[in-house]
Image (tube, rainbow, N blue to C red):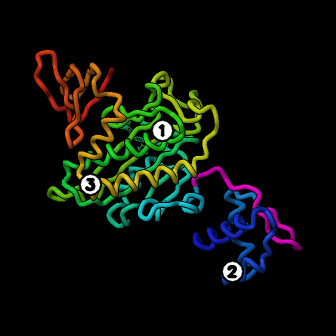
Amino acid sequence: MGDKRSRIIKALKDAQKSPVSGEELGLKLGISRTMVWKYIKSLQADGYEIESSPKRGYVLKSVPQLLYPEEIQMGLKTTLLGKKIHYFEEVTSTNNIAKEIAASEEEGTLVIAEVQKGGRGRMGREWVSPHGGIWMSVILKPGIPLRHASRLTLIAGLAVANVIRNMGLDASIKWPNDVRINGKKVCGILTEAKAEVDRVDYVVVGIGINVNMDLKDIPESIRAGSTTLKVELGRHIKRVSFLQDLLFELEQQYINFKIRPFSHILNEWLALSDTIGKEVKVTTPSRIIEGKAIGITPDGALVIKKADDTKEEIIAGRCIY
Ligand code: BTN
């Protein structure tokens, strides 16, 4: 079904608003005109505006503004990420779905949803995920030791920041994994891994980006510290092409991660870091550490120089500055 639908969409797009007859589409796909008509009906039901006239054929007037796999995959430049996409209008959490299916899925599989009702943030927090954002989880199987799984969070943050910077915005990364614009959070990342002995079976990298939302869509409690791409750019963003760019950038980072020493990625991360050099206060479940953020370890821990000149490495926590 998916393949035929995609081929019909492609043929109609290629025709650039001139009509394509049912007969021509049928011949191209090796199916009857009645079957073509059934596919057209299912596309219309999904929001593709297709005009049909019995004499002339079908004209694609507009495509839906949703993250349909067919739209994402058409023109996607990756070789691994997003080759298979599970799309949902509404889920509890894309990370939950990705973890359920990860064992039997190929690496690179993407789970994406328009809305999450039980979106999860770091440290047990809720992640509000209304219409207009990008809420997605990528399944990776890098075969690395569990202690290195946090490196994938760093590369995901780097990929998101790079794509946003390419749009002309000054995105930076706040340790451990927030992407910010002008000091306001636009993206959060939640990485979850399953490991056997010390090797990871899979890693789910969950990425949430505030794209076409207005500030009123963000909970009041975090609104002052948050932003969206639409707010920053003052215009609506084409989510499909943004996502295609992001998957490509993430794949490039992932390839680098596999073939280059991690120090290269760390240097790139440091160059975009908002945190290093600042006086910070990090809250962990057991205590609060204050001092100057002076670096990051290869496993993503923040190095803090305290008032007494001793150094401490913090692997996870809430960082304020
Ligand atoms: C954070 O900054 O606290 C991390 C937020 C991560 C949110 C994303 S949205 C897609 C994926 N599914 C979830 O439930 N969470 C992540």
**Percent coordinates x, y for residue 32 in the rendering:** 72, 83
Residue 222 sits above or below residue 242 on the image: above
Q: Which residues are magenta?
A: 51-67
Disc 3 from disc 1: Cα separation: 23 Å
Q: State which mark lies toward you, 1 or 2.
A: 1
Picture quarter with ligand 1: top left
- Which residue is disc 3 drawn over? 260
- Which residue is disc 2 drawn over? 28
Determine the secondary structure under disc 1. Answer: helix
Out of 37 and 243, give the one closest to the viewer: 243
Amino acid tagged 1: Arg
- Which residue is painted at 69% across and 63% down in the image? 43
Give the mark nearer the N terminus: 3 vs 1: 1
Q: Quadrant of residue 270?
A: top left
* Label 2 crowd (10 A; few <14 / some 14-19 / many >=20): few
Determine the secondary structure under disc 2. Answer: helix
Determine the secondary structure under disc 3. Answer: loop
**Percent coordinates x, y for residue 137 in the rendering:** 41, 51
